[in-house]
Amino acid sequence: MTTTAIPTAAPRDTAFRLTTVLSRVLIYGALVAWAFICLFPIYWTLTTSMKSAVDVTQGHLVPWLDFQPDWKGWRSLGLSPDTLGSTSTVRSEFLSRFTNSVITSLGSSLLAVVIGSLAAYGLSRFQYKFAWMRNRDISFFFLSQLILPPVVLALPFLVLYRELALLDTRIGLILLYTLTVLPIVIWIMRDQFDTIPTELDEAALVDGLSLWGAFWHIILPIALPGMVAAFILALVLTWNEYFFAALLTSSDAKTLPVMVASQTGSQGINWWSMAALATTAIAPLALIGIFLERYIVKGLTAGSVK
């Protein structure tokens, strides 16, 4: 009795494993390269704050190898370890600008999320008619406000704020920033509310809740990830805004981006001071992005799959 040998599948399995390993190496290699590209500006900014003028001009990159790091940039702001215990007018100015940025960005972002959520819920649940405009036209009208470049609005707002005594005030920046980020908040929140079935509203109304009660107790908790994502996006945009902050403020309400830009002068650019200021401006947003990443992803991907 003869037996026939069954071909082994080992070569095929080996080729499959090699293909899998090679694909993973390529994927992780691409991710590492992209992470390096994204993080290098932050690394360059942080190391520049610890360089001298010679090290900056010669492009030295690796501390303790190309150059000896020092607290030069932080010392110029009164934020180095050896100057924190002493009085510093520059540090007081920095804290004032940092506080202005925190108040204006947080205030405008919260106000935009509140107003934008209400507007988006109305556009998602009710049908409106304004002249020839319907819900879709109204939504496009809000989004089309982003087409206008800021320089077009510079003179009207400058004249209006002078008449209303809002120049160089935090409340003036908060109101203006709210208007600038409101279209984005409405766009994000309407997509978020569209993914929530209307049957939930109807069931809440049948159970005795009012329209506001259904929105507050039922719909709002479900839409929370989208609200957080909209808030973070608005916060990033208002925190980094420079044009209107430089145009409409002079001393009391100046924000951190204006202070960063002020490091340029007739004597050149104070790269170390600018880098230290930029690091302090980047750090809060980086921490927010790290701790609230899952909310950002959930909110920005809402409505992509229905």
Image: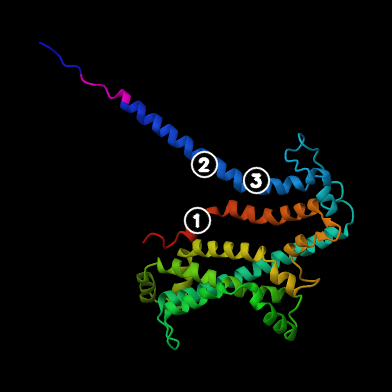
**Residue where numbered disc 3 is placed:** 40
**Precedes in sequence: disc 1 or disc 3:** 3
Query: What residue appears at the point 74 percent right and 45 percent down from the top-left corner?
Result: 47
Range shown magenta: 6-11
Residue furthest left in the image:
1
Provide the major secondary structure of the magenta segment. Answer: loop
Q: Secondary structure at mark 3?
A: helix
**Residue where numbered disc 1 is placed:** 297
Q: Can residue 218 be seen?
A: no
**Residue where numbered disc 2 is placed:** 30
- For this view, does 220 lie left or right of residue 62? left
Residue type, mark 1 in image: Val
Query: What residue appears at the point 58 percent right and 70 percent down from the top-left corner?
Result: 181
Query: What residue appears at the point 72 percent right and 83 percent down from the top-left corner?
Result: 159
Q: CA distance from mark 2 to mark 3?
A: 15 Å
Q: Secondary structure at mark 2?
A: helix
Q: Can residue 215 be seen?
A: yes
**Precedes in sequence: disc 2 or disc 3:** 2
